[in-house]
Image: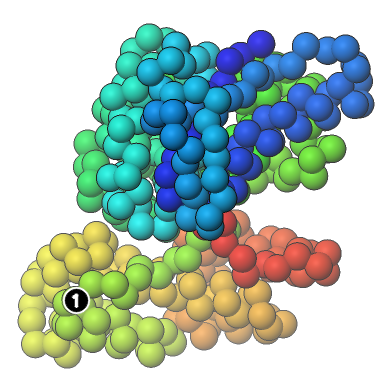
Amino acid sequence: MAFTAVLALAGCASINVAGVFDALRKADTAWRFAVDRKAEPVFEPFFVGPDHEPVRCQDGLIISAHTPASRAGTPDIVIIPGLEDDVLNGIRRNSVFVPWIRKWAKDGACVATSCTGAFLAAEAGILNGRTVTTHWVAADLFRQRYPEISLAHEEMIIDSGDVITSGGATTFLNLVIYLTERFGSRERAQTAARLMLIDGDRTSQLPYAGLSSPRTHDDPDVHHVQTLIESNLTGELSVDDLASRVGMSSRTLARRFQQTLGESPGAYLRKARMSEARRLLESTGIPVAEIMSRVGYTDVAAFGRAFKREAGLSPSVYRQKRLSRKRDGCSFAVVDL
């Protein structure tokens, strides 16, 4: 049985903390319900707080930790849930856990992160030299803050042995299933997934991710070029054309884009086209060939490669999965935040 510390983080959504705890319990309950009523649980989860005081989540729910970090010993597993929407503020509010995470990892605990919990693990220095994942929305911030850490934000779960990272907030369900297999058995994980109705086939965040970069910066020339790109997706735009429209060289434009968005104008153009293609695949019955033309492609193979690189699926499979979810009554526009 693995003693599993779930960090009671202040200010985050209650589902981030309580959801992990409940899912761990449910995974064990599923096996006892379906297979062996007397089976020993895989996990013994407990909430760890920064001290003896209750922890308040952003929605008002209060979590009373079972023990403060100073008395937790060294758990077998430490789970760091996702932080609040303002990630930097979430780091500040929960920085008290950073030295404990570092200590537990050094003493042999397996550290698992959900969503933006990866930021606290990075603050503790235990992600250096590893490839990790976090929520795709926070990918740019993570790369800016921790350039020495390799981030593969398209991945749902990355296991590097003593550290496991996972993507968006509700991927804690996939994380729990993964932990059930690693610390229990494949059969227990499969049983838990079936009884908890968890889609164990989610291996990539790309089908859920927004493809275009955000407009949260304050560079007016980059804003102008973004608008030019998004209003001319069917045209044959080039970086030289875009640079001349804002009165700068292609090299200067590329440098400004890299500084502001962390990517080149060409990469932004490709993502904008793929974002529009995805929207059309989700919301219309327009043939794929016509969608390809509407987003500026003339070669079917090139379009298919570009779409799969950005969305993780071929255009036809992407449409099929989205329509299937719609028929099943699920919202296919929802993103795990």
Left or right position of 265 against 270? left
Q: Residue 192 in the image: x percent, y percent?
A: 78, 32
Q: How is the image coloured?
A: rainbow
Type of residue at label 1?
Answer: Asp
- In this figure, what is the number of numbered marks? 1
The residue identified by callout 1 is 218
Regarding residue 127, the answer to whether it shows in the image is no
User: In the rendered view, would you say 195 is above or below 327?
Assistant: above
User: In the rendered view, would you say 186 is above or below 169?
Assistant: above
Left or right position of 150 against 165? left
Q: Which residue is depicted at the point 40% across and 70% down?
A: 212
Q: Which residue is depicted at the point 66% across and 19% down?
A: 43
User: In the rendered view, would you say 186 is above or below 327?
Assistant: above
Q: Nearer the viewer, residue 79 or 292?
A: 79
Q: Nearer the viewer, residue 245 or 296?
A: 245
Q: Which residue is depicted at the point 83% across and 38% down?
A: 194
Regarding residue 50, the answer to whether it shows in the image is yes
User: In the rendered view, would you say 84 is above or below 201?
Assistant: below
For residue 178, what is the image quadrant? top right
Left or right position of 208 against 318? left
Label 1: how many Cα within 10 Å (few below 14, some 14–19, many 20+): few
Indicate the quadrant containing the N terminus: top left, top right, bottom left or bottom right: top right
Q: Nearer the viewer, residue 240 or 131?
A: 131
Q: Which residue is depicted at the point 47% across and 41% down?
A: 55
Q: Mark 1 falls on what kind of element? A: loop
Q: Residue 27 in the image: x percent, y percent?
A: 75, 29
Q: Residue 34 in the image: x percent, y percent?
A: 91, 26
Q: Residue 159 in the image: x percent, y percent?
A: 49, 27
